[in-house]
Image (tube, grey):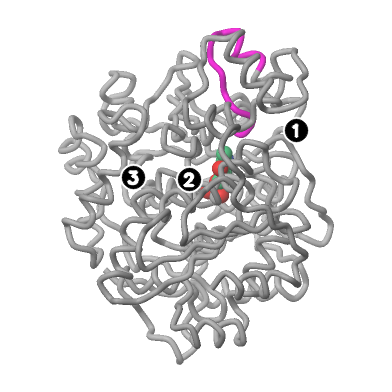
Amino acid sequence: MKFIETRGNDGSKPSSVPFSEAILSPSASFGGLYVPEKLPNLDTNFLERHLDSHYKTLALDFLQQFGIDIETEVLEAALSRYDAFDNPSNPVPLSQIEDDCFVSELYHGPTRAFKDMALQPFGYVLSKLAQKRGEHYLIMAATSGDTGPATLETFKNQEGVQVACLYPDGGTSDVQRLQMVTEDAKNLKVIGVEGNFDDTQNTLKDLLASEDFKAELADRNIKLSAANSVNFGRIIFQIIYHIHSYLELVRKNEISMGEKIYLVVPSGNFGNALGAYYAKKAGLPIEKILISSNINNILTDWINNGTYDLTTRELIQTESPAMDILKSSNVERIMFDKFGPARTKELMDALATHGKYQLTADELALLREDFDASYSDDAECEAVVGKYAKKGYIMDPHTATCMRAYDTLRDKNLKTVVYSTAEWTKFSPSVAKSLGHEVKDDTEALKWVSANTNVTVPAMIDGLFTKPIIHSVVVKKEDIKGEMLNFL
Ligand SMILES: *Cc1c(COP(=O)(O)O)cnc(C)c1O
């Protein structure tokens, strides 16, 4: 399986690369991204074959169908990281919350957010590749709160890889910040940045593109890679749980094999939704992928009107900070798939130059074949969290954005899977507030919610508050490079 480039080839890079190359050096020509040339076939045969498979068996077969250049033993070891999830026999449980609505819980890993689903195995694969080649990589991650902890956790003490993690100071929850600043390993560095997530992500993109930073790294014999969802190594693992969720519905006799379902995906950088799109394209019976956002609803605009306009927007901090994103990276991969490399380059260039672009009516129609979209503000999310808490189900604010899409966007009476991307413990003050109890901080909120509902706080969250702080640096954007060179 070869990987090609979303904005076409500039003549200096190879016109296609194997998987290993696409994940070690994820930046493609003209600032584009790598995408697979084709997808495996998820036909009824494949699905029937995995009706009784363990998650890891399904995943391994899927990865092998993809034809990636990673040895089976490495993939098996990578997938065995799911054994450390809450329930090793099923890392991604499905809970019913309405007659026809099910929550696929993607957060049962070590950092309590869906990022672990991909980063846990991905981190293992990447460090094995680095070790095998005798190379040394630097992973820089910009995080709005969940990528950071999951990236640090997966690479902690792994040879051949150093990780530097940038987070917007004040833009994450207490638990998220503590998860990062208490991580103690020689190969990890955590830096707070003054600004919001888009500033942080842009700083990282500029640094990664900068020739003199690359030269500094070359001097030290360090290569750059990335662990956010611009890296296809993340995306490939994010296709699998969509297949798993479908099979769970079949196993529970909620649908028959081949019956279509809706997926609702709370989205930011659109990696989770892109995984769903590839699953649908490969043959998984999905009626439509419903995208939910918070008030930073640029994706709603894109999918409903074909408009992507940064010029009229300012990033707004919400109670679902992992979705406080305006420049959504994986939108580009969808456009490549639907409109081709020349048009994708044109649109992405327009976004860089003018801060906006508009799809044609035909392009919009193509996009809407697979997607529909809506959003919820914080007040609406609070109401949703409160409503389901009364029924005995606690969800986090990101998951709560999904329920409006569930209520309003379905044209057909089909079973629906809503993705839960974080455990309530990462956003406990907001959850407590939704249940009618305002508290000052995370410690108090965790106590109150667990005392007043049927949920408990897992040990890895409880333990954060007594761990020593290892990383206390907060810097201005322009000082990142210096801070980085110190670390290296
Ligand atoms: C990362 C994240 C999202 C957004 O996922 P994308 O793949 O970037 O669209 C949503 N919810 C939570 C809790 C997350 O951590």
Inspect the image, locate mark 2, and give the three-letter code of the amino acid beneath it: Lys
Q: Nearer the viewer, residue 468 or 267?
A: 468
Identify the mark at residue 82; answer none if there is no mark.
none
Query: In what element is the residue under mark 2?
Result: helix
Q: Which residues are magenta?
A: 386-398
How far is the residue under mark 1 from the one under mark 3? Answer: 30 Å
- Residue at the image position 66 percent from the left and 74 percent from the top: 481
Q: Is residue 19 left or right of residue 345?
A: left
Which residue has dot 1 on it?
377
Identify the mark at residue 115; answer none if there is no mark.
2
- Residue at the image position 44 percent from the left and 35 percent from the top: 106
How far is the residue under mark 2 from the one under mark 1? Answer: 23 Å
Q: Nearer the viewer, residue 13 or 216?
A: 216
Query: In what element is the residue under mark 3?
Result: helix
Q: Is mark 2 within 8 Å of ligand 1?
A: yes
Label 2 neighbourhood size at 10 Å, few (<14), some (14-19), many (20+)?
Answer: many
Q: Is residue 72 above or below residue 318?
A: below
Inspect the image, locate mark 1, and give the three-letter code of the amino acid beneath it: Asp
